[in-house]
Image (cartoon, grey):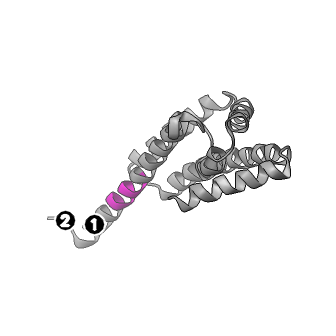
């Protein structure tokens, strides 16, 4: 029979692994959903919090923002992202479990998400700046309808 302290440490490690695994799966699912685009794929690749803002744009503006974001994002860093996901998986499976290693990998992924979100915000604001006051009012009405409809 194992000592109570050992059992407690084992359960704590199992719970941390479970939490980290759940976060990883949630991130992968969310990333896949944004890569494919939800509503008819019109905002494919647009960071999640901006998707409703992009979807409310008129078709030509939405296509322009999405295309500009794709071009800005490019394919660069894909190998590094794969390596970092592999590092996260290794950290999750490591024994003994090192919470700091998992935190470091999650922090790297968070910074990447924040960077993509900043770029997407800049592109959206740039597009909104080109609209006439009437177009922006129509956009605000469309966005308000989408938000209230949820």
Which residue occupies 28% across, 71% down? 5
Residue 111: x and y in percent read 66, 50
Q: Does the magenta-highlighted stretch encompass residue 148?
A: no
Number of labelled discs?
2
Report the residue at 61% width, 53% height from top. 49
Is residue 55 toward the left or the right of residue 69 in the image?
A: left
Classify residue 148 by image quadrant.
bottom right
Vertical placement of residue 46 versus 144, above or below? above
Q: Which of the 4 quarters of the picture holds residue 61? A: top right
Q: Is residue 96 visible?
A: no
Q: Position of residue 113 (x, y in %)?
A: 63, 47
Q: Are marks 2 and 1 in contact (CB under 8 Å)?
A: yes
On the image, the x and y values in percent for residue 35 come to: 54, 35
Q: Which residue is mark 1?
A: 6
**Residue tagged 2:** 2
Front-lying residue, 2 or 64? 64
**Which residue occupies 49% across, 47% down?**
27
Q: Residue furthest bottom?
A: 4
Give the spatial CA distance, label 2 vs label 1.
6 Å
| Main secondary structure found in the magenta portion | helix
**Residue 16 can be seen in this image:** yes
Classify 10 Å Cα crowding around label 2: few (below 14), some (14-19), many (20 and above).
few
Quadrant of residue 13 within the rendered picture = bottom left
Helix, strand or loop at disc 1?
helix
- Residue stretch rendered in magenta on the structure: 13-20
Q: Secondary structure at mark 2?
A: loop
> In this orientation, which residue lies closer to the viewer: 93 or 56?
56
Q: Quadrant of the N terminus?
A: bottom left
Q: Position of residue 37 (x, y in %)?
A: 53, 37
């Amino acid at each position: 029979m194992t000592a109570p302290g050992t059992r407690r440490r084992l359960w704590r490690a199992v719970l941390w692994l479970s939490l980290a695994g759940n976060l990883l799966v949630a991130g992968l699912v969310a990333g896949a959903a944004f890569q494919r685009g939800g509503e008819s794929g019109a905002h494919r690749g647009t960071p999640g919090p901006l998707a409703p803002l992009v979807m409310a744009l008129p078709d030509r503006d939405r296509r322009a923002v999405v295309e500009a974001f794709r071009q800005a994002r490019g394919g660069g860093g894909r190998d590094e992202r794969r390596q970092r996901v592999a590092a996260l998986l290794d950290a999750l499976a490591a024994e003994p479990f090192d919470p700091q290693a998992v935190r470091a990998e999650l922090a790297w992924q968070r910074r990447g998400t924040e960077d993509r979100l900043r770029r997407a915000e800049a592109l959206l604001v740039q597009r909104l700046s080109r609209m006439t006051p009437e177009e922006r009012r129509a956009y605000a009405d469309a966005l308000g309808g989408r938000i209230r409809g949820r």
